Amino acid sequence: MQAHDAMYIDGAWRPAIGASAIEVRNPATEELLDQVPAGTPEDVDAAVRAARAALPGWAAADPAERAARIGALRNGLAARRAEIAGTVTAELGAPLAFAQAVHADLPIAVAGSYAGLTREYTFEEQIGNSRVLHEPVGVVGAITPWNYPLHQIVAKVAPALAAGCTLVLKPAEDTPLVAQLFAEVVHEAGMPAGVFNLVTGLGPVAGEALAVHPDVDLVSFTGSTAVGQRIGAAAGGAVRPVALELGGKSANVILPGADLTRAVKAGVANVMANSGQTCSAWTRMLVSADRYDEAVELAAAAAAKYIPGDPRDERTRIGPVVSAGQRQRVTGYIAQGAKEGATLVAGGPEAPEGCERGWYVQPTVFADVTPDMTIAQEEIFGPVLSILAYEDTEDALRIANGTVYGLAGAVWSEDEEEAIAFARRLQTGQVDINGGRFNPLAPFGGYKRSGVGRELGRHGLAEYLQTKSLQL
Ligand code: NAD
């Protein structure tokens, strides 16, 4: 796909109001891939006006009609699966096999799920003498990050459309190409003009303009906690709802009787996937002190199997990180970990062998990590695992809950009931028990500073509704 030198507003590609552009680079080669326009507050304003004008018609459309359009969107994405995967590999650096299986197939599945949910959802219910109406919240401003670029777009756009809302999307500046591809698919799906609008641009300019726009009814943001706090504060000032999906520092708790080999291998795979750029990654592995050395050995051996390479090669398991800035941030944390006394058992801050060009980071494992260290508290967002020892399960619980975050986690035990009982005490939004699979219909979101609200499934749809009760 050739990048559009335009914004998708009111059902057509329209020239940007400003003249500046954002360069999109291939993280594996550092080469310029393409460029997209950098939106201004005026572009955002035009998009919000289009979304406002389209709202009454879309909100009043029969849910079956909305379901049909979302179904067409799902089919359009499925038809362009190979192109989606190729685009995400090029602009994010995700290995092709992972791009196909996750960056393309997951949003296709999520879009499909909302085609079904729109048909099944109870938009009206009777409670005693009241008829309760679940109405669309209105015009949505959606701001998304680069790490799962299409998934995060679909996880906002599909439920908002299902609810009867209209939107303006401001995607991440590092990955705007797949966002433009998505807008093409929306257009081909026959969505009425103005229902979905795309403004590419920089966070502090276009993102900020959307986040504070007085005619936006709800801002749904996925990204860093620092920006989320700012967006939440603006929403508080305007007294309007906000949905925030933020960072994480999730714990992978391996209880004493668990299958250590399986748990460690799955834990390392979870951290290395997408070069560690996953908000829900289990970046802290918690192991009982008496099995600690064995776990460290297993983890180092597992990490060694992730050899950084060209993401276009189907055999590559780990590609680069998204940008030079991200590499600098990640290697800075690796240096900090070593400085604070953690032991490097795999990887390190230097570029991986043979990967001098491209923004590559070595898959890294730290042992002897204590809960107070920076690498045990802060989100690194790179292929870096910290292994911590615990004395008993109460200690494990204290460590697991001992960060400001609460997005995800894992518990492993030979006894599923023991793992579930432990998971009930975790302050976190989702927990995988003994390797339980990701469920695109299950609510996804954070406790504590990991966010406000939930995405996916019927819980994700409810975020875009507000209720009115008629007393009869
Ligand atoms: P980021 O916060 O820098 O950017 C996210 C989006 O916000 C981008 O579109 C950016 O342009 C925009 N933005 C930046 N400054 C803004 C401002 N002042 N006003 C409005 N918009 C602004 O985050 P990132 O580096 O792109 O993404 C990585 C972060 O996202 C990580 O912290 C990760 O944990 C988090 N994340 C969370 C989830 C989740 O579901 N909880 C999912 C993926 C990523």
Image (cartoon, grey):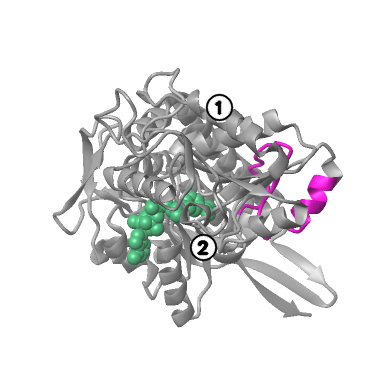
Q: Amino acid at mark 1?
A: Ala
* Residue 469 placement (x, y as % from top left): 71, 77
Residue 453 colored in magenta in the image: no
Quarter-wise, where is residue 447 in the image?
bottom right
Mark 2: few/some/many CA within 10 Å (<14, 14-19, 20+): many
Q: Which residues are magenta?
A: 418-444
The one nearer the camera, 48 or 207, is 207
Main SS of the magenta segment?
A: loop
In the rendered view, does 19 fall on the left or right side of 460? left
Mark 2 sits on what residue? 244
Identify the residue at image location x=77%, y=66%.
125
Q: Identify the residue at the far left of this view.
A: 19
Identify the residue at image location x=30%, y=30%.
28
**Cβ at disc 2 under 8 Å from ligand 1:** yes
In what quadrant does ligand 1 lie? bottom left
Query: How many badges with numbers are in the image?
Result: 2
* Residue 236 placement (x, y as % from top left): 48, 78
Is there any visible trace of residue 153 in the rendered image? yes
Quarter-wise, where is residue 283 in the image?
top right
Mark 1 sits on what residue? 302
**Cβ at disc 1 under 8 Å from ligand 1:** no
In the rendered view, does 35 fall on the left or right side of 256? left
In primary-sequence order, the first of circles 1 and 2 is: 2
Q: Secondary structure at mark 2?
A: strand
The one nearer the camera, 257 or 214, is 257
Q: Amino acid at mark 2?
A: Leu
The one nearer the camera, 23 or 293, is 293
Identify the residue at image location x=18%, y=50%.
21
Identify the residue at image location x=36%, y=72%.
213
Is there any visible trace of residue 169 in the rendered image? no
* Residue 218 placement (x, y as % from top left): 49, 68
